[in-house]
Amino acid sequence: MRMVLSISLSLLLLSAKTLGQGAGSGQKQVQATLSAPWGPSPLVMEAAEFWEGERKDKFWEFVDALPSTASTGTDKEQYEIAKKVAGEISTENQVKLMILAMALRSSSPRVEMHR
């Protein structure tokens, strides 16, 4: 799991560096995709898994603060709910890390494992 995250982060940084050099530099962009044998998991569940891995005390704080209908909305609604609740229980930098983890879908395998 950490290896996938590490590879994804490396590719993301490489892509950002390539984009920063401009199109005229002759360098090619690198794009990578990963596919899994399961569908997307609810984002609020992935956000909760992020907190479980980051700080166990924040996990229960996050889960308790979620509205009961949090996992039934669209991805955008779930993203906004997760971001709002996380902002109430943690620092801005931790919220940014959670958003990155949600964008990478790094907690999806753990969520799927518990289904």
Image (cartoon, rainbow, N blue to C red):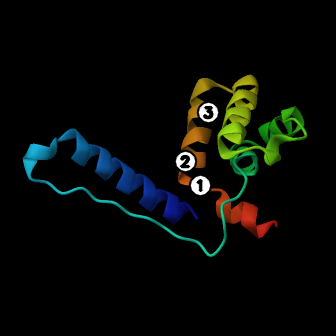
User: Counting residues from the N terminus, which is met first, the one under dot 2 or under dot 3?
Assistant: 3
Image coords of residue 99 (percent x, y): 58, 39
- Say which of 56 and 95 sits in front: 95
Whole-angstrom CA distance, mark 1 to mark 2, is: 5 Å
Q: Is residue 84 above or below residue 104?
A: above
Image coords of residue 72 (percent x, y): 81, 47
Is disc 1 surrounded by few (<14), some (14 to 19) or many (20+) residues within 10 Å?
Answer: some
Question: Which three-letter amino acid code belongs to the residue tagged 2?
Answer: Ala
User: Counting residues from the N terminus, which is met first, the one under dot 3 or under dot 1?
Assistant: 3
- Say which of 57 and 115 sits in front: 115
Q: Is residue 33 above or below residue 93?
A: below
Nearer to us: label 3 or label 1: 1
**Residue at point 65%, 56% (across, down):** 107
Whole-angstrom CA distance, mark 3 to mark 1, is: 16 Å
Which residue is identified by label 2? 103
Which residue is identified by label 3? 94
Question: Element under label 3?
Answer: helix
Quadrant housing residue 106: bottom right
Which residue is identified by label 1? 105
Determine contact: label 1, label 2, CB under 8 Å: yes
